[in-house]
Amino acid sequence: MRSLLLLLSFFLTSISIFGQQYEKILHFHSDIEVQPDKSVLVTEEIKVRCLSRMIRKGIYRDLPLNYKVTREDGSSNMIRQDLKVISVTRNGEQEPYKVTMIEGGTRIKIGNEKKNLKVGNHTYKISYTMDRVSYLDHDIARFRWNVNGNYWDFQIDTLSAKVSFPPNTDLFNIQGHVGKLYSSGVDDEQSIHLNGNNEIIFQSEMLYPEQNLTVDVTFDPAILLETSAWTRFTYFLRDYAVLLCGVLGLILTFLVNFILWYKYGIDPKKGTIIPQFYAPEGWSPAEVSYLYHEGKDIDNVFVSQLLQLLVKGHITIDNLSKSKSKFIYKVQLIAENSSQEKLTKLELGFFNILFSKKDFLIITKKYNPLVAIAQSYLIKEMDEDFSGVYFNKNANLVIPQYILPVITIFGMLICFNLFEGHMFWVVGFGVISIIMNIVFKSLFYQPTTKGRKILDHIYGFEKFIAAADLDRIKSLNTPELKFNYFERNLPYAVALGKADEWQEAFKVYQLRTNSMDGYSFNTYRGLSAFHISGLAAVSSFASVQPSSSTGGFSGGGGFSGGGAGGGGGGGW
C-alpha cells in the first residue's frame, strides 16, 4: 500500500513538473468600454508563465490598425485607426514600454532590455484607447472586437472579456466567436452573460495559438455622438494619406514642369514655310537630320551620312546577300582621285573612324564597334557645334524636374509607414511622374532664332520632297542635272525619313519623260529602295552593343478573427 502511494505521488509530481515545462498565457482578460464617440477604452490583463525561453525580458502586444468595415449588404471599406497607450504595468508596478509601427499596425514592446525577468508568473496590464471601432450599419450600430488576436505564440488557458456600453444602451444582438482566423464555428466552451449594467461577459477556456475570441454586438445608434466635420476630415486624411500625398506631388510636379516649359521651352515663332529644292547650304545630311529631329540620336543620322560619302565618291556600298530577309553590306573605300568631292570637317572625321583599321567595312545586324563609334562621333560633334547656336536642349532642367517627385516619394513612404494604404499608389505616382517628366523634357527642347530659320528651310525642303511635285522637278532639271539632282538629295531624303517618296517621284518622272539616259531607278549604285531601308535597319543593330548576359494583419466580417482589435503577441 505504501509503495502504491509513493508511486501515485511520483506520478502526480511528474505531471505537475511536466505542466511547468513550457511558457504560456495562464489567463487573458480584457475590459472593453465602448465610448459614445465610437472609440473604445481597453484594459488587458495578461498573466504569463515565464521560463526565460521565449519570455526573457518581457512580452509584446501587436494590434492592427487597418480595419475593414463590413456591412450586412456586403459593402465594405478600409479605415485607419489610431491607438494611444495610456499605461503599462507588470505585477502592479509601472513597466517600461516602447510603441513602434509594424506592417498593418503597431507593436507595444514591454520590458527592460537591460534586465531579465525572474522565472515565474507575471501579470501585465495594458490600457489603451482606439478610435473608429463602432460604426453605423444602415439603421443600427455595430461593435466588432477581436479580443486577443490570432497571432500569439502561446496557448491561452482561460480567456474572458467584459464589454461595457454606455447607460441606457439598447442591445439588439450579441454573438461571440471562438476559433481560428475567418473560421465560422463557435466553441462549445465559450459562454456569454449579460448583467443589468449593459455589460456583457464573454468566457472561454483553452485557446491554442492562432485561436481567438471575437465579439459582435449590434445596438441602438442613439447613444453614439455625431462625428464632427473636422474629425471626418482628419479621418479622410489618415485613410488616404499616401494617395493624397501622391496627388499633391503630381499637381506640384506638373506646375513646376509647366513653369519651366513656359520660361525655357517656348519656341520662336515659325516663319512661312516655302518649298525649298535644296538642303541648307553647307549642311550635311547628318546635321539636317539632327536638327530636324530635335537633337535626338536616331539611325537616319548614320545612314544618311554614309550615303553622303557614297554620293561624293569616297566609298561604294554593295549588298553581299542574295536573301531578301538578310542583309550584309560591304562598304569599300575608294582610293583618292580627282573626281571625288571634298569632305567637310564632320564628314572627314566620320570617314576616318569607319576606315581606321581596314579599307572596307562589313555592316550586318551584329554589333560593330566602328559603326557605334562613328555614330557617337557624329552626335558628339553636332551637339558641341549646335548647342546654344541652333538649339538649347535645356538638359539641366532635368534636375528641378525630379526634385519634387523624389521628395513626394519619400513623403508617400513616410505616410505609408505611418498610415499604410496601397503600395501601388506609390508605384503609380512614380510611373506617372516619370512619363510626365519625359513628355515635358521633350518640350524643353528649344531652337534658337538662328536655328528656327534653318528649320524653316529644312521644313520647306521636306515639304518639297514629300509632295513629290514632278512639275517642279522637271523645271529644275536640265538634261545634265537630272540624275545629279536626284543623287545629291537622296541622302537628305533619307535624313528626313522620305527616301521612299523621293525615289518614287523620280521613278515616275523617268517613266513619264523617258529620260535619265536610260538610268533605272529600280537601283541606285547597286542599292534598291528596299536595300536602302535594310541598310538603315542593320545599322541600328550594328551601333548597339549587346547586353551581358515583420508580421501583418488581416481584417474581416462576421467570422472569428474579424472586427477591430486582434493582432497577437509574444515574448522577447
Image (cartoon, helix red, strand yellow):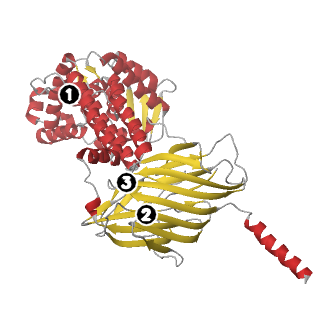
| Secondary structure state at the residue bearing disc 3 | loop
Q: Is residue 536 above or below residue 5?
A: above
- Residue 293 in view, yes or no: no
- What is the quadrant of the N terminus in the image? bottom right
Across and down, in percent, residue 480 comes to: 18, 26
Numbered badge on residue 485: 1
Q: Is residue 366 above or below residue 168?
A: above
Labels 2, 1: front one? 2
Which element type, helix, strand or loop, lies under badge 2? strand
Circle nearer the N terminus (1, 3): 3
Q: CA distance from mark 2 to mark 3?
A: 13 Å
Residue under label 2: 163
From mark 1 to mark 3, how far is it between C-alphas?
87 Å
**Crowd band around label 2 with a 10 angstrom C-alpha radius: few (<14), some (14–19), many (20+):** many
User: Which corner quadrant of the image does residue 15 belong to?
Assistant: bottom right
Residue depicted at x 73% and y 67%? 19
The answer to whether one can see residue 27 in this image is yes
- Where residue 168 sits: x, y (%)? 31, 64
Which quadrant holds residue 166? bottom left
Q: Which residue is mark 3?
A: 39
